[in-house]
C-alpha cells in the first residue's frame, strides 16, 4: 500500500475538525444534562481520528486500515453501551441517544482522519438538525396521531406534557 504523504497542516486540520465535531455533538449532550458531554465526545473524536491518521501513515497493507477502523468502532460500541441504563423506577431504558451519538462521533472522526471532509460536513449538519429538531418532530407526531411517542433518554424532567403518565408497556 502506498502510504499517503500528509503535511503537518493536513494532519492538524483533520484532528481539529474531528475535535470540533465531537465538541459540537458533546455540547448538545451537555445542554441536555447527560453524563457524557463535550469533553467525552471531544476525546473520543480526537483519539479516533488520531488512530485513523496514524494508521493511514504507517499501515503496510491496504486491509490494515479497514481492520483498525473495525476495531475502533467495535470498541466505541462498548463505550456507548456503558451509558445505557434500565431505569426500574420509571420502567424505561435511558442513554440510547447518548450511546448512539458516541458511536456516531467516532464514525465522523474516522471520516475526518481519512480526509473525507465533505461527507463529514453533511453528516454533522444532519445530526445536529436531528438532535436539535427531533424532539419537536416527535411532539408533532404525538399531537397528530394522538398517542405518546416512546420516551427516550432525552426527556427533560418537568417539561409540560412529558412524563405525565406511565410509559407504554411499562
Image (cartoon, helix red, strand yellow):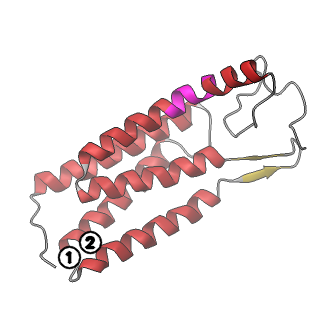
Magenta stretch: residue 44 in it?
A: no
Q: In this view, does 114 lie above or below 72?
A: above
Q: Residue furthest front?
A: 145
Which residue is rendered at x = 29% and y = 52% of the image? Answer: 112
Which residue is rendered at x = 25% and y = 43% of the image? Answer: 118
Q: In which quarter of the image is the C terminus?
A: top right
Q: Label 2's element? A: helix
**Residue 83 relative to residue 117: left or right:** right
Q: Is residue 105 above or below residue 77?
A: above
Q: 55 or 148: nearer the eye?
A: 148
Magenta: main secondary structure: helix
**Residue 45 relative to residue 79: left or right:** left
The answer to whether the residues at label 1 and label 2 have Cβ atoms under 8 Å apart is: yes
Q: Position of residue 77 (x, y in %)?
A: 55, 62
Magenta stretch: residue 134 in it?
A: yes
Which residue is rendered at x = 76% and y = 23% of the image? Answer: 145
Q: Label 1's element? A: helix
Report which residue position mark 2 lands on: 55
The numbered disc on residue 86 is none
Q: Give the range drawn in magenta.
A: 130-136
Report which residue position mark 1 lands on: 58
Q: In which quarter of the image is the N terminus?
A: bottom left
Q: Is residue 21 above or below residue 162?
A: below
Q: Distance between the residues labelled 1 and 2?
A: 5 Å
Q: Where is residue 100 in the image (x, y as percent from the top left)?
A: 56, 50
The quadrant where residue 150 appears? top right
The quadrant where residue 135 appears? top right
Q: 141 or 45: nearer the eye?
A: 141
Q: In this view, does 159 lie above or below 30?
A: above
Which residue is rendered at x = 11% and y = 61% of the image? Answer: 6
Q: Where is residue 33 in the image (x, y as percent from the top left)?
A: 62, 34
Neighbourhood count class around disc 1 (C-alpha, 10 Å): few under 14, some 14–19, many 20 upward: some
Amino acid at each position: 500500500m502506498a502510504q499517503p504523504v500528509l503535511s503537518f497542516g493536513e494532519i492538524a486540520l483533520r484532528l481539529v475538525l474531528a475535535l470540533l465535531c465531537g465538541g459540537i455533538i458533546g455540547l448538545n449532550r451537555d445542554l441536555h444534562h447527560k453524563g457524557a458531554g463535550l469533553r467525552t465526545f471531544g476525546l473520543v473524536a480526537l483519539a479516533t481520528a488520531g488512530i485513523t491518521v496514524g494508521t493511514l501513515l504507517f499501515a503496510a497493507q491496504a486491509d490494515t486500515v479497514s481492520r483498525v477502523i473495525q476495531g475502533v468502532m467495535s470498541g466505541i460500541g462498548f463505550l456507548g453501551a456503558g451509558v445505557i441504563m434500565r431505569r426500574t423506577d420509571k420502567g424505561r431504558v435511558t442513554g440510547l441517544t447518548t450511546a448512539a451519538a458516541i458511536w456516531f462521533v467516532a464514525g465522523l472522526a474516522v471520516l475526518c482522519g481519512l480526509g473525507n471532509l465533505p461527507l463529514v460536513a453533511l453528516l454533522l449538519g444532519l445530526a445536529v438538525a436531528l438532535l436539535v429538531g427531533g424532539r419537536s418532530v416527535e411532539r408533532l407526531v404525538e399531537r397528530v396521531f394522538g398517542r405518546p411517542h416512546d420516551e427516550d433518554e432525552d426527556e427533560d424532567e418537568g417539561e409540560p406534557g412529558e412524563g405525565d403518565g406511565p410509559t407504554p408497556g411499562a
